Amino acid sequence: MTEANGANSEVICATAPEGVLAELTHRCPLQCPYCSNPLDMDRAANELNTEEWIDVFRQAAELGVLQVHLSGGEPTVRRDLEEIVGKCAEFGLYSNLITAGVTLTRERLEGLAAVGLDHVQLSIQDVDAANADRISSYKRGLEKKIQLAKWVRELDMPLTINAPIHRQNIDNLEKIIDFSVALGASRLEVAHVQYYGWAFVNRAALIPTHQQALWSVDVVERAKERLKGIMTFDLVVPDYYAKTPKPCMGGWGRRFLNVTPTGKVLPCHAAETIPGLQFDNVRERPLLDIWLNSSAFEAFRGTDWMAEPCRSCELREVDWGGCRCQAFAFTGDARNTDPACGKSSLHKELVALANEEAGKPAPPFVYRRIRSDVAERKSAQESPAET
Ligand code: SF4
Ligand code: FES
């Protein structure tokens, strides 16, 4: 039996993913030092072609996926974006374009709206134009983003602003909120940077003080009240300072999957930072089979993999043990309890390190560059913090 969106009802079950993050490309004109892309980025020549991406989305719809997040890098550098978006609409998938907003023309945005694009998520670096240029290593980006936001609203499309927050823009948080309201955003993601990948390399340059983090939570809570009915908020807290970790990805292999530019299917965007996991590719294995049976998805799905203190913790099916990538980045073993958890033996060390780094002058950024010295950055990332 086939549902309205083409999904096979035998496949739709409690285990179907809700959303797919499709990294259409790693190419991007910006070089943000907290980018969620891997340090070793995929080259354009190896990217899935149009037909391959369309097949991924067809399979996703059959699997029961509801939403696709078209991301990158910068997804608009793909010349076939209109074709991909059109097919997503045809398959009944809700499409969200995650863009840095510096490459789109009005004509192209109109074309995307015409083929069925549902939503635009625009990232900003800061509301201070010079600081935004410095963080992204891209000149005059802010004015382009403002222009794009206006076009999005003129075309009556819903707009989310995504604001990664860190020590070098956190003091402008109230202005970022006002800016988002003025642009007509219906949602603002105040996303404290999470420390793996590029952000782990740049942690000392990005991590705010505990006091700044608490202040930002308070600012958002007050703004939520003030802006009820105008703009909603998603707050991703800096869990280095939390007592319990975030339920990263809603639990490993439970709600989301991520497809890389070359077709690897990951349980989260940073999963490649964990050594030893084998990732299947949509070029070689059906998406349903990967979702249900891939060893990478099975590695940390559910609670069987957990050791103490998670194994006997009453929150194990609430936060699902936190973030595997953070556990690896800080402890060197992805099976360890996320050190953001107060029950982790390394939690105090994590908090002390955060306080120490946040209390010192920020070092220069290591910018995301496709031709970077990957080996050097990998070695920085793979060194457990306590060594
Ligand atoms: Fe979550 Fe594990 Fe900490 Fe319990 S011990 S709160 S399950 S991370
Ligand atoms: Fe990979 Fe949290 S980012 S599990």
Image (cartoon, helix red, strand yellow):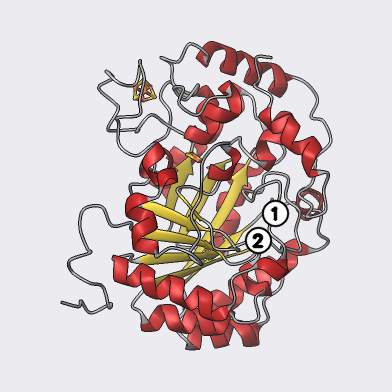
The verdict on label 1 being within 8 Å of ligand 2 is: no
Q: Quadrant of the N terminus?
A: bottom left
* Residue 81 in the image, given as x and y percentages of width and height: 58, 79
Closest to the observer, 283 or 260: 283
Q: Quadrant of the C terminus?
A: top right
Closest to the observer, 369 or 292: 292
Residue 177 visible in the picture = yes
Q: CA distance from mark 1 to mark 2?
A: 9 Å
Q: Secondary structure at mark 2?
A: loop
* Kind of residue at disc 2: Gly
Indicate which disc, 1 or 2, sits on the residue closer to the N terminus: 1
Above or below, 136 against 169 in this view is below
Closest to the observer, 336 or 224: 336
Residue 201, by quadrant, is top right
Check contact, mark 1 vs mark 2: CB within 8 A. Answer: yes
Above or below, 12 against 227 in this view is below
Query: Which residue is found at the position 35% from the left and 32% from the top?
Result: 319
Residue 41: assigned label: 1
Q: Secondary structure at mark 1?
A: loop
* Kind of residue at disc 1: Met
* Residue 274 in the image, given as x and y percentages of width and height: 56, 37
Query: Which residue is found at the position 38% from the left and 59% from the top?
Result: 19
Residue 73: assigned label: 2
